[in-house]
Image (tube, rainbow, N blue to C red):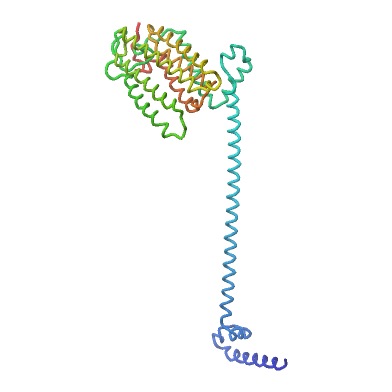
Amino acid sequence: MRINFVCASAILAVQSTLFTLCEGSQERPFGISHPLAAPVIHRGGGKIDDVAKFVKNKKEAVEDLKSTADKLVKLKRGKDAILDLKRKKDTIVDLKRKKDAIEDALNDEDFSIAAYLAGRMKTSTAFKGVVDRLKSSDRFPYLVSLAISAVYFYYFNFTPPPTCNSYVDGFCVKGITGIAPARKCLGGNSHLWAWHEDIIFTIISVILPFASKTQFPLATRISTPAIIFGHGFLHKWISSKGCSIVDPAMVEMGEKFYSAFVVALTAIMFFGFSNLPGKRPTLFILLEVLGISYGIISQSLAKVAEGNAIAMLFLSTQLIVSYLGAFHPGAQSTKIVGQTFIFPCLVSLLEYLKCDWFNTIGKCIHIP
């Protein structure tokens, strides 16, 4: 033990002597500033490298921890955002479920004028049904159309018919020449334009079910293009007769085609546009279709002399579609259909009341 102590003292004495001799130089031996650090160099210069590596590793570890902490913060924020979106989605699903429940409750009840008149529905229940449909955004557009059609009904039945020379059989026709009863539409006219437009719409109605994600019944795929084409063909036929049909044979042919068109259109409205087939016997609905069709046809033909034959069809169709869409909506009675149906109802009313403005603003010739 004593020998070791002596040896150590001797080594320190030698090192002190070396540093004393080198005090005047700019660099100390081995590049160190304290004599006690010399043994580190003598025992191995790699120790400093080890320390540097150790510090570097610790620094990298701290950076890794910091990066990990940032990632955890971001993940937590992302998780909170996902939970918030999930809560909003659950709220939307709940609101949709409540809306569907209200719609089902409205549709399950046989809410009809017939039920009210027959005493199966109280006045308070009928009033509540109307209010509920006013609150329903899907049914409201049909009620708007029904209100416009009711105005049309009033003017059609309780005021004198239009005197505008361009108003012919319920149409405000562009391209009329001459004065009634000798008026004609030659060349380009709005009947011919309607025929060309319906060709385009017929093609679209054939293609659209294949491009849509909605699965349309086969009956709808066939009846929709057929009724559009039939509507256009009726315009073409009227145009081909100069917009004035006076030949008895042509009148008879036109009445037959018109009658078939009315029955087909009424059947489509009841069977394809309403939910009545699931509530009433098919035979009962067929009787309704035939009865309403007979009423439309007979009233239309009675209006031929007044020039309001087709206007009667417009009025009847608008009333039926608006009523069914509001109170007996089927799968096709969507919100967007109701919104777009408002436009033709409004146009029909303008044609009847303001053909002079609608045709050539303020320059229509009036029949005495």
Residue at 44% x, 11% y is 296
Q: Which residue is nearer to you in this view: 294 or 50? A: 294
Residue at 32% x, 7% y is 248
- The answer to whether 108 appears left or right of 363 in the picture is right
- Quadrant where the C terminus sits is top left
Number of numbered discs: 0
Quarter where residue 20 is shown = bottom right
Q: Position of residue 331 (x, y in %)?
A: 51, 27
Quarter where residue 32 is shown = bottom right
- Quadrant where the N terminus sits is bottom right
Q: Position of residue 114 (x, y in %)?
A: 56, 13
Q: Position of residue 146 (x, y in %)?
A: 50, 18
Residue 216, placed above or below residue 55: above
Residue 315 visible, this orientation? yes
Residue 326 visible, this orientation? no
Q: Which residue is nearer to you in this view: 268 or 204? A: 268
Q: Residue furthest left?
A: 187
Q: Position of residue 75 (x, y in %)?
A: 58, 53
